Image (cartoon, rainbow, N blue to C red):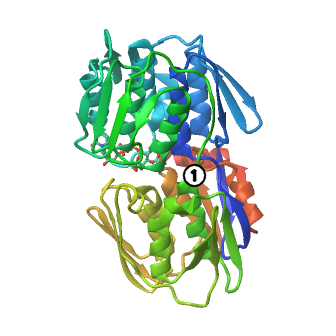
Amino acid sequence: MEKLVLEGGIPLKGTIRVSGAKNSAVALIPATILASSPVVLEGLPRISDVQTLCDLLEEIGGTVNYDNEKIIIDPSKMIGMPLPNGKVKKLRASYYLMGAMLGRFKQAVIGLPGGCYLGPRPIDQHIKGFEALGAKVTNEQGAIYLRADELKGARIYLDVVSVGATINIMLAAVLAKGRTVIENAAKEPEIVDVATLLTSMGAKIKGAGTDVIRIDGVEQLNGCSHTIIPDRIEAGTYAILAASTVEEGKQVIVDNVIPHHLESLIAKMREMGVQVETNDEQLIVTGTNRELKAVDIKTLVYPGFATDLQQPFTVLLTKANGTSVVTDTIYGARFKHIDELNRMNGIIKVEGSTAIVTGPTKLQGGRVKASDLRAGAALVIAGLIAEGKTELTGLEHVDRGYEGLVDKLTGLGANVWRVPLTEKELEQLKNA
Ligand SMILES: CC(=O)N[C@H]1[C@@H](OP(=O)(O)OP(=O)(O)OC[C@H]2O[C@@H](n3ccc(=O)[nH]c3=O)[C@H](O)[C@@H]2O)O[C@H](CO)[C@@H](O)[C@@H]1O
Ligand SMILES: C=C(OP(=O)(O)O)C(=O)O
């Protein structure tokens, strides 16, 4: 195990390139199970969630070949093997194996997913969808058992707008008989990306990216080639980092971005007084001598302010003048980073699903721990703006979502490096 050491207070400048989207990648990989011949996925990020899913596809008999920026998955020899334990527990998105394996094999056994603990994360809407398509679903000793004689299209109204349930139902429905309509569907760009792959494989899907998705089942899906979209959350994280660290007159360019995916973040940054411009595929943040203003944010489903950017954004708010109110309506308990920020001299109070940030404060470097992926991203930004050195543990969370973090930050002039934990530090972490 390692820790990340960050030297705070160094102004950053230059260009940082965004990788392929984690939340697309983790659905695109399971989607390949539905094809009858090899699928080429281009531009997947090299992160641990991608590796874990590729390992899981190999466990069920798939062949995975890595060729520079491409991953080639041959699903033809896969079998409907039960996966009640093991690697499925390491990430949230292993739930997509349910929809994809049910779609192809008409049965699946998948252990309940892991991933970031952000408060309760039920999957009742996924199950409601599978049942509507004709599957019998039971939960036995921490694993979901799914079985169907045949899957038949259905009209499914989601009681909660859910990214995971929308994608999972699409995966199960593309090979079902007849028409499926998902109402109150989520509209995130990752859903459109998965629909694009499935359509290239031969699926018939209309309306992805709106709140009604119509799927007409087909007999067979075939291999194809697909390039993933850029990661809007990674891009947003680096835009927030840029706004937190860039010096007057200097620029940080976040490259390989679809700016339209980040409109709610860009609007909030501008409201604070951050100078941010966009072109076709970049965000350009320029340092100014303006004082940053406090703003309120409320996380919402897309195209609202993304919950996954709430934690990093809170760090930027510690630099703003006044009181900012941050409300997370998606995950009301997503505030585990706050204790750590307060240990670094932040003045942030949590009341229910709201964090109240009083600024500006000068953060102080210290020893902090990432409790989840975006808490880790928030603490990386905090470490880079703090006075002195910060040591961050819990890197296994950060590695789930940020490809080549140290190299990318070093490219902007940051002084950051990874070191193995000593025996004593490992012991301290175990007892914490
Ligand atoms: C792998 C992946 O793509 N992860 C993203 C996905 O997670 P995930 O797909 O798990 O999140 P959902 O969109 O499903 O969750 C949204 C809300 O609906 C609730 N809910 C969800 C499903 C369900 O069956 N019942 C239910 O009540 C959840 O508790 C949450 O409050 O979207 C989240 C919300 O944008 C992001 O934070 C995660 O980064
Ligand atoms: C919460 C996240 O991921 P996951 O759903 O994979 O836990 C995230 O990407 O911020």
Task: In the rendered view, tell whether residue 251 sits above or below residue 255.
Answer: below
Judge from the rendering whether residue 392 lies leftward or rightward of residue 72; answer left or right: left
Image coordinates for residue 312, horizontal then vertical, percent:
50, 64
The residue located at (45%, 40%) in the rendering is: 115
The answer to whether one can see residue 345 in this image is no
Q: Quadrant of residue 388?
A: bottom right
Judge from the rendering whether residue 230 lies leftward or rightward of residue 350; answer left or right: right
The residue located at (55%, 20%) in the rendering is: 35
Task: In the rendered view, tell whether residue 2 sits above or below residue 130.
Answer: below
**Secondary element type, mark 1:** loop
Residue pointed to by mark 1: 231
Image quarter of the N terminus? top right
Most foreground residue, 397 or 277:
277
For ligand 2, tell me if the residue under mark 1 lies within 8 Å.
no
The residue located at (71%, 56%) in the rendering is: 406
The residue located at (52%, 26%) in the rendering is: 202
- Amino acid identity at mark 1: Asp
Task: In the rendered view, tell whether residue 153 sits above or below residue 212.
Answer: above
The answer to whether one can see residue 320 in this image is yes
Q: Quadrant of ligand 1?
A: top left
Image coordinates for residue 138, horizontal then vertical, percent:
27, 19
Image coordinates for residue 92, horizontal then vertical, percent:
44, 37
